[in-house]
Amino acid sequence: MIDYSSPSLVSVEEMNAFIGGAFGGNQNACEVMSFAMAVAVMYPSAASLRPGKIISGPTVFSICDAALFYAALSATGMEPMTLTSEMSIRFLRPARGEVLRARATLNSIGSRSIVGSVVAYTDDESKPVAVAQGTYMRPKKTTTQ
C-alpha cells in the first residue's frame, strides 16, 4: 500500500531546478509534491491554443506526462533516466482557461516500472478536461565489480 502522506524524496525546488537545467524552454513547472503525488502547472502560450482559445490536445498530454514524471521521482528520488513507457489519455471536455494543471498519483511502484493516474484540469479541479494513465520504466541498477 502506498502511503501518500509521506514526504516526497525530491523537493519542488529540486525538481524545478532539474527540469530547468535538463529541458531548456520547458513550459511547465512542478507546483506541489508529496510521496507518490505531484501537481504540474502550465500557463499556455498563444502557440498552444486552438481556435476558440482551447488548449491543444498535445499540450494537455504533455502536462499529464510531466505530472506523472514528477510523481514518479517523488517516490524514487532523482532518477533522471526514468522514461515514459506508455501513456493513454481520454479528453473529457475542451480545455479552456488561463492555467492548466495536472495532478498525478501513483498506483504501483515496482523495481522496474511505476504506474500512475493523472487528472488534468483548468479553473475547476472538479471539472477535469482529461484523464490519463501511464507507465514509467526505471533505469536498471548497475552493479560494480
Image (cartoon, grey):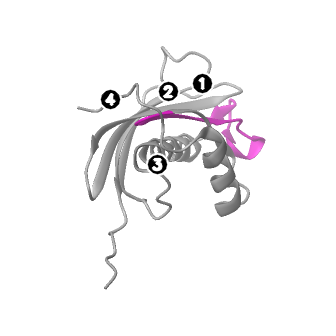
Q: Which residue is mark 1?
A: 122
Q: Is residue 53 magenta?
A: yes
- Mark nearer the viewer, 2 or 3: 3
Identity, as a three-letter code, of the amino acid under mark 4: Asp
Q: Which residues are magenta?
A: 34-55
Circles 1 and 3: CB distance less than 8 Å? no
Which mark, by number, is residue 3? 4
How far apart marks 4 and 1 lie (CA) works out to 27 Å
Relative height, residue 72 to residue 119 (above, below): below
Q: Is residue 25 magenta?
A: no
Q: Position of residue 142 (x, y in %)?
A: 34, 75
Q: Which residue is mark 3?
A: 73
Name the secondary structure under disc 3.
Answer: helix
Identity, as a three-letter code, of the amino acid under mark 1: Thr
* Quadrant of the rendering where the N terminus is positioned: top left
Q: Position of residue 116 (x, y in %)?
A: 34, 40
Q: Residue at x 59, y 44 (%)?
A: 59
Drawn side of residue 43 relative to residue 124, left or right:
right
* Quadrant of the rendering where the C terminus is positioned: bottom left
Q: Earlier in the sequence, mark 4 or mark 1?
A: 4
Drawn side of residue 51 relative to residue 101, left or right:
right
Identity, as a three-letter code, of the amino acid under mark 3: Leu
Q: Residue at x 62, y 18 (%)?
A: 123
Q: Earlier in the sequence, mark 4 or mark 2?
A: 4
Closer to the camera in the image, 4 or 21: 4
Q: Earlier in the sequence, mark 2 or mark 3?
A: 3
Q: Which residue is mark 2?
A: 129
